[in-house]
Image (cartoon, rainbow, N blue to C red):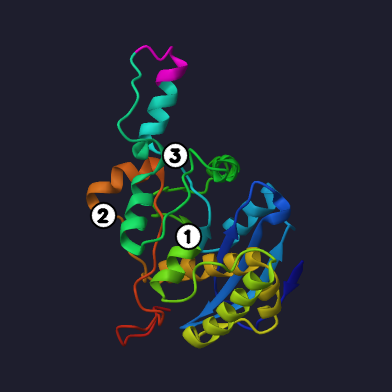
Amino acid sequence: MRAHRPIGATPVLTAGIDLSADPRKTGVATLAWSGEDATVVELAVGAHDDDALCDVVRRAATTGIDCPVGWPDAFVEYVVAHRAGGHDLVVPETRRPLTYRATDLHVWQRTGVRPLAVSAERIGAAAMRCAALLAMLTRSGTVVDRAGGGPVLEVYPAASLKIWQLPHRGYKGDAPENRATREDLVDQLAIAFPWLDLVGFDRACRDSDDALDAVLCAVVAGLAHHGRCETVPEDLRDTASREGWIVLPLGASDPTRDGTPLPR
């Protein structure tokens, strides 16, 4: 599924990638920002191989990827110790440090939405693909900061939706009740984000949660580009540089929440 919308001026581009281990389930969106307004100019599901995804990132000022960009430090250390023979390994009192990164626990506490555990759930397969993509970008000269300080950000649409007080559960999949929730979510987005133009692409978002999540990733990337997202707590910066950090938007859905326009 692919669609394009021409636009007149040369805008700031941000991209969103709803990354899956299966390229057929990977959604990609590009937004063009002009002042405070954002327009969807490209939306595709299942149309990008790894080289094409890297090209998307290079064209955009900022790209949000819905996928963990790292693993918990404690998990990595545990696996390395096991590979070395595991002589000193003991059963941990809790597996939480092995399964959840610092950013996962932060998002869970901040929003009440629990990210999937990259070291213990199927999302780990997508994270392996993501690691290879980040390596490809690094080899080609793109600076990758897993803590979110560069052009590639880890984002989590469900947590962003929760912060925006929009439906964040039950919109994925093709079951009738999930499709109905997704239809309602797209309707609510039009109200909450009057600055986001989905015209010509709203049907794709209603038909596919992969397409919708890609657009949401691109929105968060744009807000981050304009300084409208939370930053990493200083005491977690070092950990985030290895494990990754989920970038969350500020608490209001309106990017002019403080009364000032977005930077141009």
Q: Which mark is residue 71?
A: 3
What's the CA distance linking mark 1 and mark 3?
16 Å
At 47% from the left and 17% from the top, the residue drawn is 83
Residue 67: percent from left, percent from top: 53, 51
Q: Which residue is mark 1?
A: 156
- Above or below: residue 21 compared with residue 161: above
Q: Secondary structure at mark 3?
A: loop
- Magenta residues span 81-87
Looking at the image, residue 24 sits to the left or right of residue 187; the answer is right
Observer-nearest of 176 and 62: 176
Q: How many marks?
A: 3
At 56% from the left and 46% from the top, the residue drawn is 123
At 50% from the left and 85% from the top, the residue drawn is 195
- Above or below: residue 190 compared with residue 28: below
Q: Residues within 10 Å of mark 1 (few under 14, many from 20)?
A: many
- Above or below: residue 185 compared with residue 145: below
Observer-nearest of 62 and 190: 190
Looking at the image, residue 8 sits to the left or right of residue 241; the answer is right
What's the CA distance linking mark 3 and mark 2?
19 Å
Residue type at mark 3?
Trp
Looking at the image, residue 241 sits to the left or right of residue 36; the answer is left
Residue 5 visible, this angle: no
Q: Earlier in the sequence, mark 3 or mark 2?
A: 3
Q: Nearer the viewer, mark 3 or mark 2?
A: 3
Q: Which residue is mark 2?
A: 233
Looking at the image, residue 261 sits to the left or right of residue 207; the answer is left
Q: Secondary structure at mark 1?
A: loop
Q: Earlier in the sequence, mark 2 or mark 1?
A: 1
Is residue 153 a member of the stretch shown in magenta?
no
Q: Earlier in the sequence, mark 1 or mark 3?
A: 3
Asked if the residue at tag 2 contacts the one at tag 3, i.e. Cβ–Cβ closer than 8 Å, the answer is: no
